[in-house]
Amino acid sequence: MTAADAAIEAVSTTPVLLVALDFDGTLAPLVDDPMTARMTPRARAAVDALAALPDTVVALVSGRSLGHLREIAEHLDASPMWLAASHGVQYWVPGAGEQPASDDAADLALRDRLREAITASVAHLDGVWIEPKEFGVGVHTRVADAETAREAREAADRLVAAEAPGWRRRTGHDILEFAFRHEGKDSAVAHLRERVGATAVLFAGDDVTDEDALRALRTGDLGIHVGDAETAATLKVADIDALVDVLEAVARQRVARAQ
Ligand SMILES: O=P(O)(O)OC[C@H]1O[C@H](O[C@H]2O[C@H](CO)[C@@H](O)[C@H](O)[C@H]2O)[C@H](O)[C@@H](O)[C@@H]1O
């Protein structure tokens, strides 16, 4: 048995498994227009199959705002899937719905002002656009050339450094994000682990922000990186399809264990 097979078997046989999955680049291919992102049909079938198993909880853990995540994940009110959105600030709990996330009027006012200033400062840059986020702002450069992308990032960095030096700065695939809330995917997984009483966690992600969660996993958990970047994950898979192979193997083993 390979080390990967042993790690998959360990999480498959745990009493209560939390399967926590990043969305963009992990279950859904990256696309130019973020609101058109969707899980591949195989990924959708694999997460639905896991979520239907006893003692197996599936959660999407994403940098997206909750409303956007529900839309692109086609997440219905009756879904058994938990959601941790905005990098672990917003939660949706099966049967209970959206959990209130507190915020402060001054933070929201600064968010609006900075968003406007950043939008104005990049308006002349081809292929750069601003995503309004619940707790901050995202600067997208997927369709900009490298020099224009650098100019956009520098403009946003200058404005945030001057007005909100305490905001959390994150980079990702062709995006630079700033937020006044500092939670990360590590705290999201810790919160979910506690809430669902998981005895082990399988976490998979493809981007820099997923490394927060991967670094915080414990002995007996399984961290999976989708792609070829440097990672704290114990297992690397080439792409979404290869991740789905692992998820299907876990589901098969949990079905066998329950019989
Ligand atoms: O934590 P995730 O679920 O991976 O979300 C991270 C960011 O995803 C979105 O941006 C990324 O995906 C887009 C659609 O494929 C792509 O166009 C963009 O280049 C990527 O950075 C989303 O728009 C962000 O808000 C999320 O933080």
Image (tube, rainbow, N blue to C red):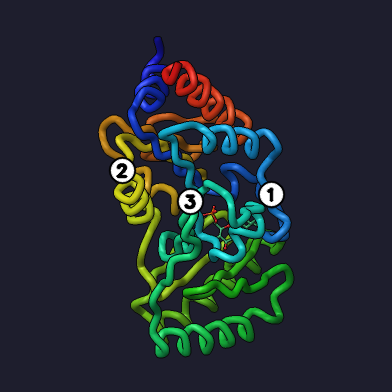
Which amino acid type corresponds to the residue marked 1 in the rendered image? Arg
Q: Earlier in the sequence, mark 3 or mark 1?
A: 1
Q: Residue 189 at x, y = what percent?
A: 36, 49
Whole-number angstrom distance, CA of label 1 to CA of label 2: 29 Å
Residue 115 is at least partly visible in this image:
yes
Which amino acid type corresponds to the residue marked 3 in the rendered image? Trp
Q: Secondary structure at mark 1?
A: loop
Nearer-the-camera pick, 244 or 252: 252
Q: Image point 55% across, 61% down: which residue?
A: 64
Q: Image point 38% across, 76% down: which residue?
A: 102
Which amino acid type corresponds to the residue marked 2 in the rendered image? Gly
191 lies above or below 16: below
Nearer-the-camera pick, 108 or 45: 45
Q: Secondary structure at mark 2?
A: loop
Q: Secondary structure at mark 3?
A: strand
49 lies above or below 22: above
The numbered disc on residue 95 is: none
Q: Residue 76 at x, y = what percent?
A: 63, 54
Q: Residue 137 at x, y = what percent?
A: 53, 74
The numbered disc on residue 38 is: 1
Q: Image point 41% across, 84% down: which residue?
A: 107
Q: Earlier in the sequence, mark 3 or mark 2?
A: 3
Residue 230 is at least partly visible in this image:
no
Tag in front: 3 or 1 = 3
Q: Which residue is mark 3?
A: 82
Based on the displayed image, in which of its 4 quarters is residue 148 positioned? bottom right
Give the quadrant of the C terminus: top left
> Label 2 neighbourhood size at 10 Å, few (<14), some (14-19), many (20+)?
some
Whole-number angstrom distance, CA of label 3 to CA of label 1: 17 Å
Based on the displayed image, in which of its 4 quarters is residue 146 positioned? bottom right
Q: Which residue is mark 2?
A: 197
